[in-house]
């Protein structure tokens, strides 16, 4: 096997979204970077339930959005209602944290299908 | 400022509109975006904002194509999950990020591909800039080839 190269550590940019947050952001990214606020709230609750994360206890979606800041994620309004959207900077940042927390489905042993 | 911001008027289409906006592609986008979930038809009706017959037709098509698996343990309430063994699942995940990158000038797809290679082909160094170091990739491929050859002897 190829050894890990210690000279190439991954520098992750703060803030840390933690496991449930990284999973939520991976969903939002693959969803096309934005989604209806109500769908985001459902997904936020779902990921918090399925991937309980101590650091995000008592965080609702609004708290999480405020914690990340508008450079990374914003709430907005379209003609049909409110949405949540990752900024371009947020897209790259979220991809790094998704890798860090191994939230993609090709990682072994981390995912068991959950009921919606 | 973390209040509401003006969003451009372009509509949000699945995969950036590459495949139109049929219910089929809306369902695909939803299940690929969150493959950890078992979906009931009603979940996808809500997520895609389409009628029950339309979603049923999409689920039937995607199951027959092998992208979804239908679990009828409870015959009255079947659930569907993504067939993560399907290469199309992997490719569609990359495509979801590619759409973002083309739109934003970002580099998320390369990062995700690097993660996929690292976790499925061996222990690569984690790239800082999202690009696999060419030498490492070649070495890993050579090593896998040697392993396969030694197994076949």
Image (spheres, coloured by chain):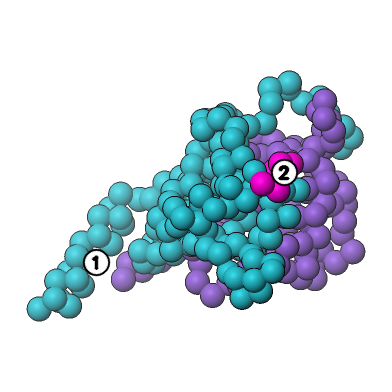
Q: Is residue B4 left or right of residue B132?
A: right
Q: Secondary structure at mark 1?
A: helix
Quarter of image, res B103: top right
Name the residue rendered at 82%, 43% in the picture: A37
Q: Position of residue A18 (x, y in %)?
A: 71, 61
B17, A59: nearer the viewer? B17
| Residue for badge 2 | B51
N-term-proximal mark, 2 vs 1: 2
A63, A50: nearer the viewer? A50
Q: Is residue B44 left or right of residue A36?
A: left
Q: Position of residue B32 (x, y in %)?
A: 57, 52
| Residue for badge 1 | B144
B85, B54: nearer the viewer? B54
Do the residues at pointers 2 and 1 share their chain? yes
The hue in which chain B appears in the rendered picture of the protein: cyan
Q: Within 10 Å of the Cα at label 1, are there few (<14), some (14-19), or many (20+) other Cα atoms?
A: some
Q: Position of residue A97 (x, y in %)?
A: 62, 55
Residues shaded magenta:
B48-53
The hue in which chain A appears in the rendered picture of the protein: purple
Quarter of image, res B75: bottom right
Pick out the residue farthest to the top: B9
């Amino acid at each position: 096997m190829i050894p890990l190269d210690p000279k190439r550590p991954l520098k992750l940019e703060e803030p840390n979204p933690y496991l449930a947050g990284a999973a939520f952001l991976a969903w939002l990214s693959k969803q096309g970077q934005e989604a209806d606020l109500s769908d985001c709230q459902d997904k936020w609750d779902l990921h918090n339930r399925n991937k309980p994360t101590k650091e995000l206890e008592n965080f609702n979606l609004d708290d999480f959005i405020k914690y990340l800041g508008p450079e990374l994620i914003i709430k907005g309004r379209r003609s049909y209602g409110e949405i949540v959207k990752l900024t371009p900077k947020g897209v790259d940042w979220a991809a790094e944290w998704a890798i860090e927390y191994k939230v993609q489905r090709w990682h072994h042993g981390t995912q068991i299908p959950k009921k919606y | 400022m973390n209040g509401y911001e003006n969003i451009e008027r372009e509509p949000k289409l699945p995969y950036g509109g590459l495949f139109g906006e049929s219910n089929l592609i809306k369902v695909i986008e939803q299940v690929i975006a969150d493959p950890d979930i078992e979906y009931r038809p009603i979940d996808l009706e809500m997520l895609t904002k389409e009628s029950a017959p339309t979603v049923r037709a999409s689920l039937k098509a995607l199951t027959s194509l092998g992208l979804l698996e239908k679990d009828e343990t409870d015959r009255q309430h079947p659930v569907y999950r993504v067939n993560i063994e399907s290469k199309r699942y992997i490719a569609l995940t990359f495509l979801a990020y590619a759409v973002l990158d083309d739109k934003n000038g970002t580099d998320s797809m390369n990062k995700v591909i690097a993660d996929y290679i690292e976790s499925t082909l061996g222990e690569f160094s984690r790239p800082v800039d999202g690009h696999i170091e060419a030498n490492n990739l070649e070495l890993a491929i050579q090593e896998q080839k040697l392993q396969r050859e030694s197994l076949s002897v």
